[in-house]
Structures are given as C-alpha cells and as structure tokens.
Image: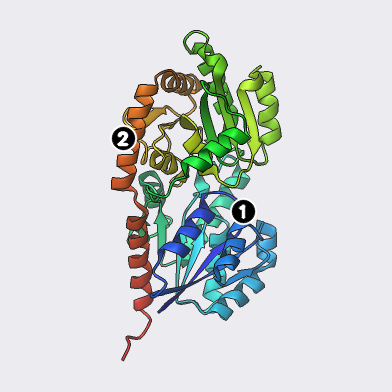
C-alpha cells in the first residue's frame, strides 16, 4: 500500500480541484491510500468528508497566509507520513515542495495545472512567478505538464531537468455525462424557450479567461447572424470571479441587452454544457482545460481561441472551431456559424465524443498517474518479504 497526500491551496473552484477528485476516485484504493491537505473549506474538502477520505485544512488560501501557515503544513505532512506528496497548482507548489522537504517526505510531484509564466505581465509578476515555479521545479522529483505547449515552455526555460518533466493530459469519462432529466430540469429552471440557441461559457471570470473579449465576440456574432435569428440567441456566463463586475458593465456598454445572462457559480457546470448548443472559451492560456473535454463528452462543439491547453483537445474544423488568440471578430464568426448551422454542430459534436473517448479517457490518465506514483514510491519503499 502506497500512501499519497494531495495538497491544493484552494479547493473552491477551477479545474485543479476536479483533477484532485478524479485522482482520489480513480486510483485503486487497494494500492493507494490517499488524503487531502487544503487551504479552504470548499466543495472538495466537503466531498472528502462525505466519502470518508482523510482531509486536513491549513491556512494557505492565499500566498501570504500560506507563508505564515508553513509550520502547519509541515505538521500535516508529518502526521500523514506519505510516500509521495502531489502538489496541485502554482501556489500550492512552492509552499508544498518546501514543506514536504522539511517534513522528510521521500518524494514530491508538482502538477502544473496553471503555469505561472503565462501571466508575467509586469516585473513584479515576473519575479513572483519565477519564484513560484522555480522552487517546486527544483525540489520535486517530477513536474507534470498537461499539454504540449506547457511541456515545451518548461523545457526551453530550463526550469526543470528534462528527465523530470512528464506530460499527462487531463481526461474525462465519456459515459459520465448529465442525464437528460437533469438537463431538462435546468432548462425549465432558467426558462430556456424552445426555438432559442444557447452558447455557454463555464469558468472563472478573471483576467485569464478574458470574458470581456468573449462579450465582444458575442456582439459580433449577433450582428453577423442570418436574418432575425440572432434575436433568439443567448449567451450564458456560468461562473464568478474578481472581474464579474467589470464584465457585466462591459456587456451593458456593448448594448447586449437580454442576450447575455450572468448566472454566477453553479453546482454542475457540465449540465449547462450539455444543455447548450455549444461551448465557447476565450482564455489567454490553459494548462489543459477540462471544459472542452467535458463539452466533447456531451457531444457539443467547442469554439475557442487556439491557445496552449485548448488546441491539444479541439481539432479545428472537426470537433469545433479555433480562432487566433485575441481575434474577437473571428471568434464571433465561428459562434454565429455553428449556431446558424445545427447540422454542422451536430457533426462536430459526434466527432468530439469519438475524439475524447479515443484520446482523453479518464482511465488512461489515471493509469499514467498510477505508474508515476508507483515508480517513485517503490524507489524508496522496501519490497515486501
């Protein structure tokens, strides 16, 4: 039995907590004994308590509290005595890597869900992000990147030795999709009328996701759509974040009226994807975004910018449409094209289900992680007599 401890600084929202849950559920309980260390009382820690999975909260929900709470983090690792610590995300990584070393944990893995270097837009951020990446890359046995673009960024920056870099894509279960009854209930609750077309965005409303660009693309879409159809087109923003007030004001300034709906964080974002005609994503960058994989599993086409962590998943012209980063006109044209052509959308949705089942099944992802953890743990754990 190998003991595995996951550490994530915040377990509230985003793809990181979803991946942690996948690992907690997907790794063989007969071989891996798992626990969670986290910085907040979010949905993931509550789920662990419901499932009887050991979890420890430490004060690391922010960088400042994380530095102040390093002693508690070291104590948590000493109490759990894992063979391997798995660090999830850019802020958990430097704190957890240092604490694991202090606690005498034999091995550490850093999963780079959202590499910090993509938003080094100022000198302060560049220095901060360099530190945030360099510490775990130096102290961890393996650095897991989630996409080709991420992998080569770490490689040519020289932040981790090539032998320590591993690429493991995120995955989904193509058979684990929302029920038709659940989708119908959502449509009824939010008064989706027959004959309307609905695009959905699911994610945080922050500077990475560029929802302001999405709104500009939506304005272009409803202006360029055929005839009177755009009057029955709706964009649903499912998520919350620090820029929500700004993007709501931006929608008002663009005179988008009641074609855009901000519904905040919802308990099941995948149900919104399943209900919609297409998923739209306007991110500047991603590690390897889960929502396009979820959309393909639901048989929905994806419209997005061709960025790292998205272009790995979406086959342009086959399972969705990709626009050059920042080209809101092209993004809007792609939205309008698929909303106006349901047969093309249906064809892309079918191709998406086939692609996600072949290339990104969760079983394949879990097998890769199991091999990685097993290999590290066995290098220090004595063989059974």
- How many marks the image carries: the answer is 2
Mark whose residue sits in front, 2 or 1: 2
Identify the secondary structure beneath mark 2.
helix
Question: Which residue is nearer to you in this view: 67 or 157?
Answer: 67
Q: Residue at x 39, y 39 (%)?
A: 296
Residue 213 visible in this rendered orientation of the protein: no
According to the picture, the residue beneath numbered tag 2 turns out to be: 351
Residue that sits furthest to the bottom in the current view: 385
Question: Which residue is nearer to you in this view: 143 or 11?
Answer: 11
Q: In this view, does 319 lie above or below 18?
A: above
Q: In this view, does 250 lie above or below 290?
A: above
Q: Position of residue 261 (x, y in %)?
A: 63, 29
Q: Which residue is drawn at 33% across and 61% down?
A: 368
Q: Position of residue 25 (x, y in %)?
A: 45, 63
Callout 2: few (<14), some (14-19), or many (20+) C-alpha neighbours within 10 Å? Answer: many
Give me the disc on residue 58.
none
Q: Where is residue 197 in the image (x, y as percent from the top left)?
A: 50, 23
Image quarter of the N terminus = bottom left
Q: Where is residue 290 in the image (x, y as percent from the top left)?
A: 45, 46
Q: Is residue 21 left or right of residue 79?
A: left
Residue 302 is drawn in which quadrant? top left
Image quarter of the C terminus = bottom left
Alpha-carbon span between mark 2 and mark 1:
32 Å
Residue 259 visible in this rendered orientation of the protein: yes
Q: Residue at x 32, y 86 (%)?
A: 383
Q: Residue at x 69, y 59 (%)?
A: 64
According to the picture, the residue beneath numbered tag 1 turns out to be: 12
Q: In this view, does 24 lie above or below 227?
A: below
Residue that sits furthest to the top in the current view: 227
Callout 1: few (<14), some (14-19), or many (20+) C-alpha neighbours within 10 Å? Answer: some
Pointer 2 or 1: first along the chain: 1
Identify the secondary structure beneath mark 1.
loop
């Amino acid at each position: 039995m190998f003991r595995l401890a996951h550490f994530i600084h915040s377990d509230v929202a985003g793809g990181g907590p979803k991946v942690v849950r996948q690992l907690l559920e997907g790794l063989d309980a007969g071989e891996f004994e798992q626990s969670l260390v986290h910085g907040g009382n979010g949905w993931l820690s509550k789920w662990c308590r419901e499932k009887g999975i050991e979890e420890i909260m430490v004060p690391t929900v922010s960088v400042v509290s994380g530095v102040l709470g390093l002693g508690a983090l070291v104590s948590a690792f000493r109490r759990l005595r894992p063979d391997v610590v798995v660090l999830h995300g850019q802020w958990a990584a430097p704190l957890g890597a240092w604490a694991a070393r202090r606690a005498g944990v034999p091995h550490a893995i850093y999963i780079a869900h959202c590499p910090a270097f993509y938003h080094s837009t100022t000198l302060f951020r560049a220095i901060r992000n360099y530190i945030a990446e360099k510490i775990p890359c130096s102290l961890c046995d393996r650095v897991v990147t989630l996409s080709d673009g991420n992998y080569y960024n770490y490689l040519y920056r020289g932040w981790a030795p090539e032998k320590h870099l591993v690429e493991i894509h995120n995955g989904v279960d193509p058979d684990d999709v929302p029920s038709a009854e659940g989708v119908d209930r959502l449509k009824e609750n939010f008064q989706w009328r027959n004959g309307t077309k609905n695009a959905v965005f699911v994610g945080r409303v922050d500077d990475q996701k560029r929802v302001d660009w999405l709104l500009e693309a939506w304005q272009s879409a409803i202006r360029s759509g055929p005839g009177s159809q755009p009057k029955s087109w709706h964009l649903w923003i499912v998520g919350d974040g620090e820029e929500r007030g700004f993007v709501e004001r931006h929608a008002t300034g663009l005179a988008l009226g009641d074609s855009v709906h901000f519904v905040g964080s919802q308990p099941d974002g995948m149900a919104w994807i399943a209900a919609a005609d297409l998923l739209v994503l306007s991110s500047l960058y991603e590690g390897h975004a889960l929502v396009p994989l979820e959309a393909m599993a639901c048989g929905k086409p994806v419209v997005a910018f061709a960025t790292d962590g998205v272009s790995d998943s979406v086959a342009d012209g086959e399972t969705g449409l990709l626009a050059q980063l920042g080209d809101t006109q092209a993004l809007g044209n792609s939205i309008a094209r698929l909303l106006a052509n349901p047969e093309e959308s249906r064809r892309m949705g079918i191709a998406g289900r086939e692609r996600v089942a072949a290339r990104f099944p969760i079983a394949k992802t879990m097998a890769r992680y199991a091999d990685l953890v097993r290999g590290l743990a066995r290098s220090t754990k004595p063989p059974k007599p």
